[in-house]
Image (cartoon, rainbow, N blue to C red):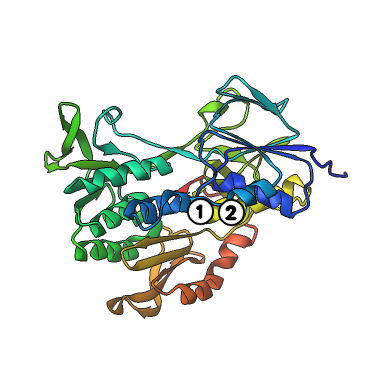
């Protein structure tokens, strides 16, 4: 059957995944109408620098913009910014917006990302910050410049990066979370413990396996955190990085399948003429034989390219080798693949004692992940050992799962 090209593509979400989809459509020859709808008023910007370069003050906030205005103009797309999507009629492919408007297209791409979770009692309490938007990074930097003690609640990528940046700014920092060591879920226990040692060496106080009972406050301003075991940690500023949820509330009555994201097939298609991309998309990974949702910058770009191709009729499954990186203090950690709880960790290059190494995680059926510590070139070379695990069609029927990363 001949594929019918759309005359109009609407991308809902104007951040990295949404913009990358639009750019990929143009590179692949799409000459029709192209609309990007975004909830934020700012031009599309990158989020990884928020917890590092923007927070530290090394970059001005405008430097995080993904493209100069001239490049956006050359895209020949209509940008509807500052107007959040509120509902989708999947049958008509019509999106309603907060301003009361609506946009109808032949193809709709959902790229609304995720929303940060909050702790009970957090909203409205002065001195408590989340870090998702560029305005959040600017506000947090201002708060840290006038503070001495910071508690970061959440030991994932965002929490650990924020703690590292704040420590380099001279604050007394405590990083706490439920995991034994920061990023255990993303890195596995061995590399995560190396990261914990790195934070300790730089003076960060760690509270692994810690749960928060409540935030402490006086006169509407946070004064610290009380842990479930009764310990109280004083703070001038508290950052909560307690995970995120896919931004799908606006899709509740759309008829799309929602289950920790927009559920899609192997081609990232959620319904006829409707696709999902980036942090919000949970698609069936053909190589793993299960659905997967990835919260990382690399996936936003790679999946956008795949979705653009499939909108234009390429009809190819999206089968990536998951990749993410994190920069903390003077260390860049890179990971190809996903660590497995039952994997065996094997040192394949370098020496942890010298601060440069590559490890491989071997699962029951072979290598599943390669992680590098200050060895970027060598880590990329070892990526080949895990490619088959992700790209070869699988008959495995393991349960659906998600993995969040930066």
Q: Which residue is mark 2?
A: 301
Most extreme residue toward the right is 2
Apparent side of residue 178 relative to residue 264 in the rendered image (left or right): left
In terms of secondary structure, where does tag 2 sit?
A: helix
Q: Residue placed at 46% from the left, 72% from the top?
A: 376
Q: How many residues crowd around disc 1 within 10 Å: few (fewer than 14), some, or many (20 or more)?
A: many
Where is residue 38 drawn, in percent x and y?
A: 56, 35
Q: Residue placed at 41% from the left, 63% from the top?
A: 343
Apparent side of residue 110 relative to residue 2 in the rendered image (left or right): left
Q: Which residue is mark 1?
A: 297
Quadrant that contains the N terminus: top right
Q: Are marks 1 and 2 in contact (CB under 8 Å)?
A: yes
Q: Residue placed at 24% from the left, 41% from the top?
A: 238
Task: Find residue 264 and report its image quarter.
Answer: top right
Spatial separation of the CA atoms under disc 1 and disc 2: 7 Å
Apparent side of residue 354 relative to residue 312 in the rendered image (left or right): left
Where is residue 50 drawn, in percent x and y?
A: 40, 50
Q: How many residues crowd around disc 2 within 10 Å: few (fewer than 14), some, or many (20 or more)?
A: some
On the question of residue 189 being in view, the answer is yes
Out of 226 and 75, give the one closest to the viewer. Answer: 75
Out of 24 and 43, give the one closest to the viewer. Answer: 43
Task: Find residue 187 and report its image quarter.
Answer: bottom left
Where is residue 218 drawn, in percent x and y?
A: 14, 29
Residue 251 drawn above or below residue 393: above
In terms of secondary structure, where does tag 1 sit?
A: helix
Most extreme residue toward the top is 100
On the question of residue 20 being in view, the answer is no
Out of 19 and 337, give the one closest to the viewer. Answer: 19
């Amino acid at each position: 059957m001949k594929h019918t090209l759309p005359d109009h593509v609407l991308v809902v979400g104007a951040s990295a995944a949404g913009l990358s989809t639009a750019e990929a459509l143009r590179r692949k020859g799409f000459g029709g109408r192209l609309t990007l709808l975004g909830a934020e008023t700012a031009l599309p910007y990158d989020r990884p620098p928020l917890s590092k370069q923007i927070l530290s003050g090394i970059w001005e906030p405008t430097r995080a913009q993904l493209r100069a205005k001239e490049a956006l103009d050359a895209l020949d797309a209509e940008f509807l910014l500052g107007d959040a999507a509120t509902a989708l009629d999947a049958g008509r492919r019509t999106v309603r917006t907060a301003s009361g408007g609506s946009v109808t297209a032949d193809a709709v791409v959902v790229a609304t990302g995720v929303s940060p979770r909050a702790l009970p009692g957090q909203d409205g309490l002065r001195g408590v910050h989340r870090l998702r938007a560029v305005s959040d990074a600017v506000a947090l930097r201002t708060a840290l410049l006038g503070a001495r003690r910071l508690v970061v609640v959440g030991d994932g990528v965002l929490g650990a990066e924020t703690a590292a940046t704040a420590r380099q700014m001279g604050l007394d920092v405590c990083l706490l979370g439920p995991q034994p060591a920061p990023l255990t879920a993303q890195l596995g226990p061995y590399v995560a413990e190396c990261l914990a040692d790195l934070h300790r060496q730089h003076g960060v106080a760690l509270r692994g396996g810690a749960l928060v009972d409540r935030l402490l406050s006086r006169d509407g301003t946070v004064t610290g955190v009380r842990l479930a075991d009764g310990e109280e940690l004083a703070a001038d500023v508290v950052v909560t990085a307690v995970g995120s949820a896919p931004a799908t509330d606006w899709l509740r009555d759309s008829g799309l399948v929602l289950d920790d994201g927009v559920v899609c097939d192997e081609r990232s298609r959620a319904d006829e003429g409707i696709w999902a991309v980036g942090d919000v998309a949970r698609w069936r990974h053909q190589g793993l034989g299960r659905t997967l949702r990835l919260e990382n910058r690399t996936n936003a770009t790679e999946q956008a390219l795949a979705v653009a191709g499939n909108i234009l009729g390429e009809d190819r499954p999206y089968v990536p080798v998951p990749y993410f990186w994190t920069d903390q203090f003077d260390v860049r950690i890179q990971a190809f693949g996903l660590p497995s709880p039952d994997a065996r960790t094997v040192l394949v290059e370098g020496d942890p004692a010298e601060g440069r190494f590559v490890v491989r995680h071997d699962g029951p059926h072979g290598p599943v992940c390669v992680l590098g510590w200050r060895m970027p070139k060598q880590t990329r070379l070892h990526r080949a050992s895990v490619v088959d695990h992700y790209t070869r069609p699988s008959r495995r029927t393991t349960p659906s799962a998600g993995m969040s990363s930066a």
